[in-house]
Amino acid sequence: MALKQKHSSSDYVLYIGSYLNSKIVEQRGLPTFNVAGSNRMHRLANALRTANQNVMIVSPAASLRMKWTGKLFHIASIAKTGHVPVFFCPAFGLPVINSLLETITLLWSIILISRRVNVKTAIVYNFNPALVVISLFLKYILGIRIFNNIEDVSRPKLDDWRKTTEVRPLQQIIFSTCMDIIANLSEGLVIPTKRFLPDLPTNKPALVISGCMPLNKISNDFQKVKYPINILFSGKIEFEHGIHFFIDSLEQLQSDLECNINDNLVINICGAGTKTDWLTEKIDSLKDLPINYFGFVSTEQYQDLLQSADICVALQNPQGRYSNYKTPSKVYEYLGHGKLVVATPVGDLPNLPTQVIDLCDSDIRSSLKQILRKLVINTAIIQKRRELTVKYARENFSFPEVGNTLKAFVLAE
């Protein structure tokens, strides 16, 4: 591990949160890749770097459920994601203990880094008890301005205690408190949708950043759409995220002879969640449907599935538990990759131009079936839509566009 000696002419932004890569997950026996969070941190950090702003990600790389890998102590290490350095804090190799000491290792790491580079601003990704302590330390001990990047809102509800819930009720209570504390300590908030604003402090400036993609990933490679058409559903396999809407719509579509779904479609599903058993049973009972379920996949596998997709669907329940508390960030990833996207009207998706996204109406199953039917019968729509989507993504979601806006927001005095 090595850090440069301190240079007075270079101000840094620290981006603090649970960024993970495959190497650190394997080395430390971590239970998850935190794919959505890691992708978001990678993109916003690299967007800032594109705007000529020095930035470093600081990650605890620890978990309550970390497995024993034969090491009592994992030393700190430095990696890179894109053009941004990542500092992985030291961690104890014992399950539970490493999580309890996460605050201490984060504090040590931030002190070490701040002695070697000038830290002007810190962006705290989401919230948890350790990040509350870190935010207090940054603001009141080091005198560093902090901003809270809130990707999901936490608010407890009585229904969370029902047996049928997909929510962890105690976690909602703890995280809601942590969110309020960090948000109030912050100079401003970075959020993916305006729908979060009613649940956040009204006296804080907020910057909405929905999509964020590197220019070289916004593909202009439009090969002619051919049968069979490839449809991708990825993410949490839960009713809150619409897996039941998707399967029910495919069942309805199967009886449409003009679509000839068995010959004209390939359906790929990846992800994990509380309804994986339900999905597996459904697929077994619908043997005629051309569905491939891959479970939780690696980053490389996911990129292969995304690359081959013609249509991507995101079906978060617009009347569900998380209707105003989560937004499907992967929709903007799909758009950035030039995919035709079918989604439900959640977050700020209804504000997107109709020529770059298809939104289901209140009867999601029937609406989704009709949209897919239209696309399967007329592949020219897919072809044209992808061209418009890429143009829109380049103009609104590219690193230079996002980076300059984010830099101006977090560095404004």
Image (cartoon, grey):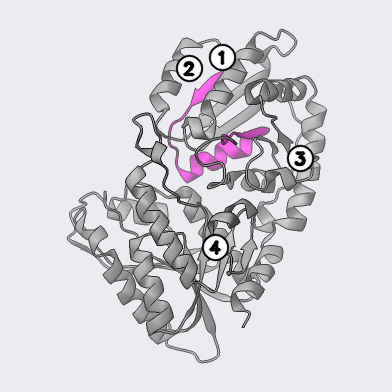
Residue 283 numbered mark, or none: 2
* Residue 192: percent from left, percent from top: 60, 55
Which segment is the magenta one?
A: 289-318
Residue under the point 72% across and 21% down: 370
82 part of magenta stretch: no
Task: Give the SS element for disc 4.
Answer: loop
Relative to the observer, which residue lies in front, 222 or 158?
158
Task: Give the SS element for disc 2.
Answer: helix
- Whether residues under marks 1 and 2 lie with C-beta atoms below 8 angstroms apart, the answer is yes
Judging by the rendered image, the residue that carries numbered circle 3 is 386
Name which residue type carries label 3.
Answer: Arg
Name which residue type carries label 2.
Answer: Ile
Q: Residue furthest bottom?
A: 8
Left or right, 118 with respect to 220, comes to: left
Mark 4 → mark 2, Cα distance in angstroms: 38 Å
Mark 4 → mark 3, Cα distance in angstroms: 26 Å
127 w.r.t. 256: above or below:
below
